[in-house]
């Protein structure tokens, strides 16, 4: 041992440092550690990686910065996507490269400590054991990156370009324009008016519709849970029915029911009282109808959720309250509500987030209509259905993307509460 | 005194039943109305009746027998997408959930946060890019393109759900198996999967049902009618000439709504238990 120490002191560079430095060329460090096969594999993999991806990444990164230089020849949108994919591939490459350094270092440390060199089988086994979780998530992660993350990044990037119907590739090149789109959104009159009216309706819609569906679900869950009520199973099954029917079917049915000319609500019900309401042509009444329909669609989930959680409220707490002479209201207020709201808070937050982005009901019921003078969104459009129209109907991609980013910020607020909530559950102690 | 309390209780219960009855009517009326519409002869909505004088099954017959009807093809397409989506999503999400539930690795914590965050971003936000990506690999107007998007999009929510359920399976079980010499995959296959059957059934079911209910994604990806899924096809029945085809739409919808609702009602309690355990123990 003493001799060993002497030797390593007299050397200027420790083996682990040398192994890391040599690893600048992938595999060389491993070869220095006398792990020739591994080093060779590292070398092959990194060379293959470089050869196959170099051109793609080169063009991608260049495209990401310039968005092309020759109109008609360079397609800015394809370059942008290639750029984003390049970033991801590059991140993978850097990951392998860093792993190469770390591996060389840890092998060198093992050699300094004179641990025996693992056999081929042991090496493969160790690699399999350490890498196992990565192999498991790899297929899903790759899909997630390309199907969810790249499209979101792309949308994010579009918000800083001038991509619209008049300025579209391949005829024209796109440019990075910084925050111009966001400035336009709050300065140009038509955008400003539309944005603020749509945004405020989105907030009202989210808060009112979601709160109503939660309140109705809560009341029903408490009522059905009452010990004096019979046929609980049957009642619960019927109350869950609106959730079981595919939403697009029920929304389209409602859309027909509310139709002012042939819909049953005006024709068969309200006509009894000599009332005809402009359900689809007046923004106010359309909004009322939308909120009622969403309550109809959304309460069963909350009802089922609360019904499930109600079973888990500890009985002895009620008994203790009885002993202290607590009234029913007090028991509800201080035992039941805190318990079930705490247990379901993350899911309730998700309900708000879900309605904030509830494209289906807005679009299927009345396509966001009726039209409103002086703005380029319909009277009942929420942000996401407006984005849909801007994208697929008027091709205002840049503005749609800018609005998407603002929506993303709002969603992140929901997510932030979600994180805090989940974190607090964690501290409560899993096993 | 005792009498009046009993009376009060009776009145309360009566009011609860009345309230529940009102709810039943509100729930049943639209569904009943749609069913009755599907039995009305002809397609003129102006002359439809809630209780038709001469009910008919002509719309149901039309869906299956008329040469202009693609209904059977749509049903087949939806079934195909649904089966692949259901099997694929169970495989992908259970693998991810296993890694996140049982292993420590670099990026684990941020991966979980990423799933939570991504659940809240609807796929619609990235639709333009998805379309362009599918276009570059030639999968627009193809059921495969649709499947890939479904499979990728379901990951954040379901991985989170299944991971939460895996967390409730005692770790002692896999440690005991490890001592007996079981490898990573063997533990996954013989312990985790069998014990997690309820939640995997929920994931399978919901991903089976999703293609039957979603019309938006097919609308963007698919263009030729023989590639349509049911939801998109039905939507197009009434999208163009609303008043002329609603009776037909009603018939077609009832044929998907009934099986889906039945399966759903049978299995919803698994979903609730899965959701609450996943959310509260995540």
Image (cartoon, grey):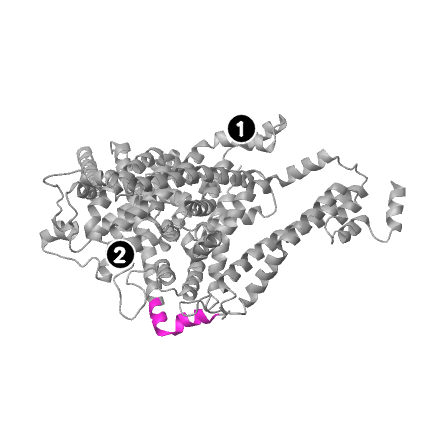
The answer to whether residue B276 is above or below residue A183 is above
- Number of numbered discs on residues: 2
Residue topped by disc 2: A366
For disc 2, the chain is A
Instruction: Name the image quarter holding residue A384.
Output: bottom left
Residue A426 within the segment the image draws in magenta: no
Q: Residue at x 23, y 52 (%)?
A: A255
Q: Nearer the viewer, mark 2 or mark 1?
A: 2
- Viewer can see residue A317: yes
Q: Position of residue A111 (x, y in %)?
A: 80, 42
Q: Nearer the viewer, residue B178 or B3?
A: B178
- Residue B6 location (% of width, % of height): 19, 34
Q: Quick check: do tags 2 and 1 share a chain?
A: no
Q: Is residue A298 visible?
A: no
In the picture, which quadrant includes the N terminus of chain B?
top left
Q: Would you say the residues marked 2 and 1 are in contact, meaning their CB atoms lie under 8 Å apart? A: no
Q: Chain of mark 1?
A: B
Q: Residues within 10 Å of mark 2 (few under 14, many from 20)?
A: many
Secondary structure category for the residue under label 2? helix
Can you identify the residue that label 1 sits on? B190
Q: Quadrant of residue B99?
A: top right
For label 1, the SS is: helix
Judge whether residue A193 is colored magenta: yes
Q: Which mark is residue B256?
A: none
- Quarter-of-image position of residue B135: bottom left
Q: Is the stretch drawn in magenta largely helix, strand or loop?
A: helix
Which region of the structure is painted magenta? A179-194
Q: Percent position (x, y) of residue A126?
A: 68, 37
């Amino acid at each position: 041992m003493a001799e060993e120490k002497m030797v390593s002191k007299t050397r200027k560079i420790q083996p682990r440092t040398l192994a890391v430095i040599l690893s600048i060329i992938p595999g060389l460090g491993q070869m220095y550690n006398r792990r020739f096969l591994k080093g060779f594999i590292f070398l092959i993999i990194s060379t293959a990686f470089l050869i196959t991806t170099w051109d793609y990444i080169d063009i991608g990164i260049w495209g990401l910065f310039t968005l092309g230089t020759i109109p008609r020849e360079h397609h800015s949108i394809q370059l942008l996507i290639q750029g984003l994919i390049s970033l991801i591939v590059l991140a993978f490459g850097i990951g392998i490269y860093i792993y190469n350094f770390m591996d060389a270092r840890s092998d060198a440390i093992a050699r300094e400590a004179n641990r025996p060199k693992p056999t081929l089988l042991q090496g493969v086994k160790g690699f399999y054991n350490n890498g196992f979780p990565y192999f498991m998530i790899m297929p899903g992660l790759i899909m997630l990156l390309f199907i969810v993350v790249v499209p979101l990044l792309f949308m994010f990037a579009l918000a800083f370009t001038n991509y619209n119907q008049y300025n579209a590739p391949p005829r024209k090149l796109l440019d990075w324009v910084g925050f111009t789109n966001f400035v336009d959104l709050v300065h140009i009159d038509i955008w400003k008016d539309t944005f603020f009216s749509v945004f405020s309706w989105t907030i009202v819609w989210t808060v009112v519709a979601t709160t109503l569906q939660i309140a109705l679900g809560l009341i029903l869950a408490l009522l059905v849970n009452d010990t004096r009520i019979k046929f609980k199973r049957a009642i619960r099954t019927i109350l869950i029915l609106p959730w079981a029917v595919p939403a697009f079917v029920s929304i389209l049915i409602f859309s027909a029911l509310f139709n002012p000319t042939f819909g049953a609500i005006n024709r068969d019900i309200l006509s009894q009282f000599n009332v005809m309401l402009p359900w689809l042509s007046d923004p106010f009444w359309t909004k009322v109808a939308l909120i009622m329909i969403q309550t109809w669609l959304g309460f069963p989930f909350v009802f089922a959720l609360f019904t499930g959680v109600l079973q888990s409220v500890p009985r002895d707490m009620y008994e203790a309250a009885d002993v202290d002479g607590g009234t029913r209201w007090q028991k509800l207020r201080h035992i039941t509500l805190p318990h079930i709201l705490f247990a379901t808070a993350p899911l309730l937050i998700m309900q708000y987030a879900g309605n904030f982005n509830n494209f289906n009901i807005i679009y299927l019921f009345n396509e966001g209509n009726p039209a409103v003078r002086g703005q380029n969104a319909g009277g009942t459009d929420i942000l996401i259905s407006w984005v849909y129209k801007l994208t697929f109907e008027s091709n205002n991609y840049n503005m749609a993307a800018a609005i998407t980013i603002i929506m993303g910020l709002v969603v992140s607020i929901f997510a932030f509460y979600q994180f805090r909530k989940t974190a607090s559950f964690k501290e409560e102690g899993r096993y | 005194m005792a009498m009046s309390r009993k009376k009060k209780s009776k009145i309360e219960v009566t009011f609860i039943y009345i309230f529940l009855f009102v709810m039943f009517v509100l729930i049943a009326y639209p569904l009943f109305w749609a069913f009755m519409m599907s039995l009305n002869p002809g397609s003129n909505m102006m002359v439809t009746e809630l209780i038709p004088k001469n009910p008919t099954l002509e719309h149901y017959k039309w869906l299956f027998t008329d040469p202009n009807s693609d209904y059977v093809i749509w049903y087949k397409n939806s079934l195909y997408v649904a089966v692949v989506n259901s099997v694929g999503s169970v495989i992908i999400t259970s693998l991810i959930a296993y890694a996140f539930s049982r292993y420590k690795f670099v990026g684990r914590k941020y991966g979980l946060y990423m799933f939570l965050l991504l659940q809240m971003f609807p796929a619609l936000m990235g639709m333009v890019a998805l379309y362009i990506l599918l276009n570059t690999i030639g999968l627009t107007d193809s059921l495969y393109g649709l499947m890939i998007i479904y499979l990728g999009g379901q990951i954040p929510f379901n991985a989170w759900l299944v991971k939460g359920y895996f967390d409730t399976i005692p770790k002692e079980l896999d440690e005991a198996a490890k001592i007996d010499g079981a490898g990573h995959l063997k533990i996954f296959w013989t312990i985790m999967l069998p014990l997690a059957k309820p939640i995997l059934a929920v994931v399978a079911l919901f991903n089976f049902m999703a293609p039957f209910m979603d019309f938006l994604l097919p609308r963007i990806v698919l263009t030729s009618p023989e590639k349509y899924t049911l939801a998109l096809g039905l939507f197009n029945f009434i999208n163009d000439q609303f008043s002329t085809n609603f009776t037909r739409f009603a018939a077609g919808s009832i044929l998907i709504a009934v099986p889906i609702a039945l399966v759903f009602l049978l299995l919803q309690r698994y979903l609730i238990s899965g959701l609450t355990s996943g959310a509260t123990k995540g």
